[in-house]
Amino acid sequence: MFPSKDELKICFAHVAYRLRERFLALATSIESFEVRDGAALEQRIGEADVLVISGLWHNNLLPRAKRLRFIQSIGAGTEQFSLEALKQHGVRLASARGVNARAVSEHVTALVFRSHQRIPKSA
């Protein structure tokens, strides 16, 4: 069960994306913090109810993540997450699967046209 909105805390964990800045612009009044490396994530994972992450995850974080109930993977793949361990800890996982499907298919179509009809390169 998630805590109420007043008690919820989100951790944004990515080495480059500025996800927290965008989240703060929404003025949700939900508390959040950002980490940019594995050491900082290890240190602060215990504070998070929700984790928005890409690349910094390792399953050894779970024992420290006592409050964690939900992980949003920024990427489409979830191979780095142990689904069994997450289930045992009561943590749900969502991915960004399919988010780039249209852009990728359009790009591939353009490349096919370019290679077969000699469409000039985009600058």
Image: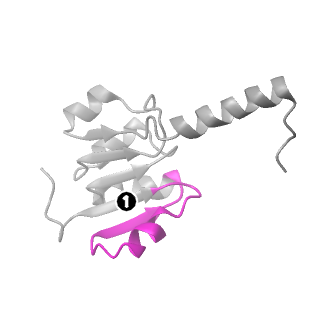
**Residue wearing tag 1:** 11
Residue situated in front as seen by the camera: 55 or 77:
77
| Residue 46, position as x, y percentages in the image | 30, 56
Rendering quarter of residue 109: top right
Residue at (25%, 50%) from the top-left corner?
68
Rendering quarter of residue 103: top right
| Residue 83, position as x, y percentages in the image | 31, 28
| Residue 33, position as x, y percentages in the image | 39, 67
Residue at (29%, 49%) from the top-left corner?
65
Q: How many marks?
A: 1
Residue most extreme to the front: 117
| Residue 17, position as x, y percentages in the image | 55, 59
Residue most extreme to the top: 116
Residue at (67%, 30%) from the top-left corner?
108
- Residue 12 located within the stretch drawn in magenta: no
The local crowd at label 1, few if under 14, some if 14 to 19, many if 20 or more residues have their Cα within 10 Å, is many
> Which region shows up in magenta?
13-38
Residue situated in front as seen by the camera: 44 or 78:
78
- State the SS at label 1: strand
Q: Which color scheme did the rendering employ for the protein?
A: one colour
Q: Quick check: 21 above or below 118? A: below
Q: Is residue 56 left or right of residue 63?
A: right
